[in-house]
Amino acid sequence: MILDAYDTLSNDVTMPKLGLGTWFIPEDGAAEAVKQAVALGYRLFDTAQAYGNEAGVGQGVRECGLAREEIFVTTKVAAEHKTYEEAARSIDESLEKMGLDYLDMILIHSPQPWDKVNQSDNRYLEENRQVWCALEDALRAGKVRAIGLSNFLEADIENIWTAAEIKPMVNQVLCHIGNTPQGLLDFCKSRDIVVEAYAPVAHGVALENAEIGAMAEKYGVSIPQLCIRYDLQLGTIPLPKTANPEHLRLNAEVDFVISDEDMTVLKHITPLKDYGEFGRFPVFGGKK
């Protein structure tokens, strides 16, 4: 079962191959969502300072009935924090909000502040290096076990890579049927960077696509199951978002295999009109 499968990061930390994304799960519902997911076998939970639900996620982790080391918790430094001091302070604030002694992973949420994403040519290269230094220091201090990036493109990653004392271990990106950044996936693989795929169901847009629906019917599965399996076979770690217990259960029932031929078909489906987290991140298109 996929919930029993783990990937190994470049620093030998292991993380589950399927997780729960918590964007849009409100603070007052996050703890219960985490506890329900844990009961079903989920062990990876992804939040962010920008989601406004870190406290709820932390509560769910503390109250789920499992030892802390059995759960893998990720948060992200807000995209607006572009100095060492801001990032370092925000990491401590996240730990305090979540009521945890350490986090399993922290990511830089975006190379650009939200209001500049796809609106500016400034990639904040030096600023991101400073934020990365804060993540490295948090790792050295034992506040976090792994560090990485989110929504970083090849040049953004290379900027960190060439200056980093500790190399990025993960890059979390928008990746789903109709939006497969194959060049970026290959680039990350060449650097031994594990890729997490957020919004595997394209923020629900995939549910309305007739081609995807027909392929799901062929395999006797739901559209979300097909989408999650697609991301798994790309070698990524999918992070579907839901607080619905039945959806949580079904999202983990993906122990089927999409044929190579059908993977090619799905990879070249007409790009879906999903514009990513917070409506600004790039849609790569299935042919890239």
Image (cartoon, rainbow, N blue to C red):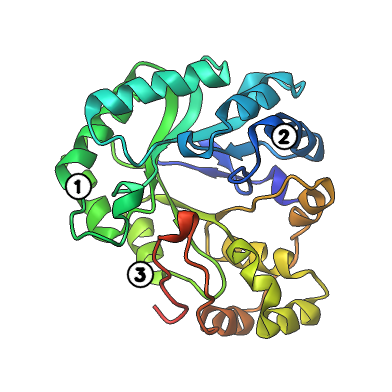
First in sequence: mark 3 or mark 2?
2
x, y percentage for residue 82?
25, 36
Mark in the foreground, 3 or 2: 2
According to the picture, the residue beneath numbered tag 3 turns out to be: 183
Q: Are marks 3 and 1 in contact (CB under 8 Å)?
A: no
Residue at the spot 63% in from the left edge and 82% down from the top edge:
262
Q: Is residue 72 above or below residue 92?
A: below
Tell me if I can see residue 58 in this picture.
yes
Identify the mark at residue 272; answer none if there is no mark. none
Q: Is residue 247 above or below residue 139?
A: below
Is 4 in front, or is 217?
217
Is 120 in front, or is 107?
120
Residue type pointed to by label 1: Tyr
Identify the mark at residue 124; answer none if there is no mark. 1
First in sequence: mark 3 or mark 1?
1
x, y percentage for residue 34?
71, 34
Which of the 4 image quadrants contains residue 176? Answer: bottom right
Residue at the spot 61% in from the left edge and 22% down from the top edge:
69
Mark in the foreground, 3 or 1: 1
x, y percentage for residue 104?
50, 29
Residue type pointed to by label 2: Gly
According to the picture, the residue beneath numbered tag 2 turns out to be: 29
Q: CA distance from mark 1 to mark 2?
A: 35 Å
Q: Is residue 156 above or below residue 96?
A: below
Secondary structure of the residue carrying tag 1 is loop
Count numbered badges in the picture.
3
Category of crowding for the residue at label 2, using alpha-carbon neighbours closer than 10 angstroms: few (below 14), some (14–19), many (at least 20): some
Which of the 4 image quadrants contains residue 245? Answer: top right
Residue type pointed to by label 3: Gly
